[in-house]
Image (tube, rainbow, N blue to C red):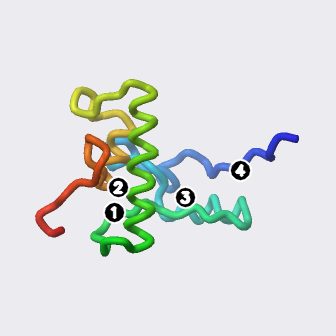
Amino acid sequence: MPRARKKMPPRNKKNFRSTKSGAGMTRAGVAAYRRANPGSKLKTAVTGKVKKGSKAAKRRKSYCSRSRGQMKMHNINCSKTPKKRICAARRRWRCHSEGGLIRTQHD
């Protein structure tokens, strides 16, 4: 038996970021999704500085490697097409273009 389709919040500026501002869902969008889908564990992007080995660092590492696989599958090169949603989201999550994490001056 197929799983029931999850209810998504409306695609508007309140719930989803534009590609220009980093793509992905906003805090309000995640809250709307969780209201529509009780028991959901959806969380917002890990964008700040995190301690090495923390839960947030592991979530970031997992997202970065998963999105790297999507880029590879769809043959997307962010240095050539930086305006793609996946590229904007990876920048927001601070994923490095080669699959690792972006090192900032603050890290």
Along the line of sight, which residue is nearer the eye, 105 or 12? 105
The residue at which mark 1 appears reads as 47
Q: Callout 2: helix, strand or loop?
A: loop
Q: Callout 4: helix, strand or loop?
A: loop
What percent of the width, then of the height, locates residue 101? 27, 54
Mark number, residue 93: 2
Mark 3 and mark 4: Cα distance apart in space: 12 Å
Ranked by sequence position, the earlier of labels 3 and 4 is 4
Q: Is 95 drawn above or below residue 59 in the view shown?
A: above
Mark number, residue 7: 4
What percent of the width, then of the height, locates residue 16? 48, 50
Ranked by sequence position, the earlier of labels 2 and 3 is 3
Mark 4 and mark 1: Cα distance apart in space: 25 Å
Badge 4, how many Cα within 10 Å: few under 14, some, many 20+? few
Badge 3, how many Cα within 10 Å: few under 14, some, many 20+? many
Mark number, residue 29: 3
Ranked by sequence position, the earlier of labels 1 and 2 is 1
Amino acid type at mark 3: Gly
**Do residues under tags 4 and 1 come within 8 Å of each other at their CB atoms?**
no
Mark 2 and mark 3: Cα distance apart in space: 17 Å
What percent of the width, then of the height, locates residue 51? 31, 75
**Do residues under tags 3 and 1 come within 8 Å of each other at their CB atoms?**
no
Q: Callout 3: helix, strand or loop?
A: helix
Badge 1, how many Cα within 10 Å: few under 14, some, many 20+? some
Q: Callout 1: helix, strand or loop?
A: loop
**Do residues under tags 1 and 2 come within 8 Å of each other at their CB atoms?**
yes
Residue at 34%, 49% in the rendered image:
22
